[in-house]
Amino acid sequence: MATTYLSYTQGTPTNNKKWTWSGWIKLGGLDIGTRYIMSAYDDANNNTNIRFLDTTGRLDFQNYVSSSDAGRLKTTMYLKDPSAWYNIVCIFDSDNVTSGDRQQIWINGVRQTVFDTETYPSSGAVSIMNADTRVAEIGRRSDGTDMWNGNMAHVHFCDGQAYAASNFGSFDATSGIWVANSSPSVTYGNNGYFMKFASGATGTDSSGEGNNMTVTGTLTTTKDNPDNNFNCPNQNQNRSGMTYLNGGTTMKGVADSTTRGGFCNFALNSGKWYYELRFGDTISGEATVGICDQDVVPQRTGANINPFSTDSLRSYGYRSGGNKITAGTSAAYGNTYADGDDIGCAMDLDAGNIWFSKNGTWQNSATIAEIAAGTTTNAAYSSMVTGKYYVVAQMYENLLKTYYNFGQGSFSGTAFSGTTYQDSNSEGIFKYEVPSGFLAICTANIKANS
């Protein structure tokens, strides 16, 4: 959503002294500064915002009226996990008889009680959010700055109600994980809305109140959601010199002569998995796509990260020059590739086999049928060392960008058009056909495979 936002003009509120906002978010780039989740903006001296104020990952819920805080909570806790979905619930209830309950933040079902900034509204204070004729926006500050850069799902606004987080989610009895209630029993009020961001109807209000939003920019739907979390680059591991775009699925390097390797979040030690990747900009030097064992990851932090070097004994990759590589040793394998080419990877961690494709063509004369059958004659590698493997890409020089698709359904935030494919469990959206039995790297498949 980095250049996209939703907006609508509010009407007469049910009660602009009481409302609840709930949404699920997945962070984009951690090093980006102020990012607005929701905003209602009258002018610089009168606005209501839910935002990340800086790069620390602290959530800031502010009602700013007549140039002063008429209610503000800024968390001490940092939200720094770009692989996770967070449920944020913010409550404004200035008529509450208990001062400390007039403004609240809940994160993943837990009420926040420790703050860097803690100012509560006076009794009967009004908010700019949910005020008549004000424009409410999702995804940016309402004066046009500080755009949101991650994903969102299950966004609710309830005018005239102060709902606890338990209305919008619950703790799973088995895992203890906070999970979404996709159809909460709530009252939305005059200005309320429920944004499902459904494909083809991204601005449609599903609350029944008819408060449809105008979508400015291109809002790309994704298969990644709170109920099924998809793999993405690990920003905390790959911080030096890297920036992240498109909900964190795009990694961008810098123009220098440093080798940088981008590790992704999910470690896999069994099963059959498939993912796709595209390099953008000009490949200078040599780029590599593949997997790397978790024991190598702690050694590969900072500016110089080469997960396919001679001391990386459990790494397997396909290089832009056409060779394959393991433990720093290259050998002839397939065709060269350049920026704009799409690389696919099928890995069978049960049998220890890995194959790569270029623009849908499996390399070294492998066929999709033999990959599904486990025939290793034309595999890049067979009998790989047992381990816990991360997806990884190595980049070198020239502002190189790496676009991942683990089944989210796009490269660089642009949804695939024409024929697309899913895995054997009907999960994910891929540009190229997935070998039978190979799966998207997402929590639904990991759970089924465990």
Image (tube, rainbow, N blue to C red):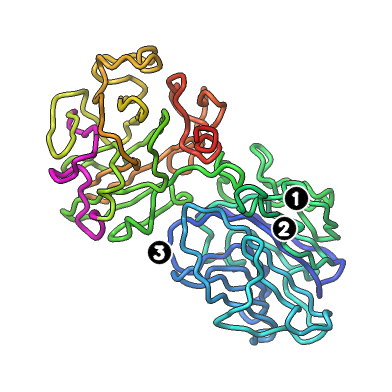
Q: Are marks 3 and 2 in contact (CB under 8 Å)?
A: no
Please rate how many residues cluster around mark 1, counting C-alpha atoms within 10 Å: few if below 14, some from 14 to 19, many from 20.
many
The amino acid type, in three-letter code, at marker 1 is Asn
Front residue (pair 377, 275) = 377
**Position in image of residue 42 (x %, y %):** 68, 74
Query: What's the residue at 76%, 78% (across, down)?
Result: 102
Q: CA distance from mark 2 to mark 1?
A: 7 Å
The tag on residue 8 is 2
Query: Was residue 313 drawn as part of the magenta stretch in this picture?
Result: yes
From this viewpoint, is residue 441 visible?
A: yes
Question: In x, y percent, where is residue 112?
Answer: 63, 72
> Which type of secondary structure does the marked residue at label 1 adopt?
loop
Main SS, magenta residues: loop
Picture residue at 31% right of the left edge, 47% below the top:
294
Mark 2 or 1, nearer chain start: 2
| Chain-order first, disc 1 or disc 3 | 3
Give the amino acid at mark 3.
Answer: Asp
Q: Position of residue 87 (x, y in %)?
A: 63, 58
- Mark 1 against mark 3, which lies toward the viewer? 3
Task: Give the side of residue 50 with respect to residue 252, left or right.
Answer: right
- Span highlighted in magenta in the image: 299-322
> Residue at label 1?
212
Q: Which secondary structure, mark 3? A: loop
Q: Position of residue 313 (x, y in %)?
A: 19, 41
Q: Which image quadrant for residue 115? A: bottom right
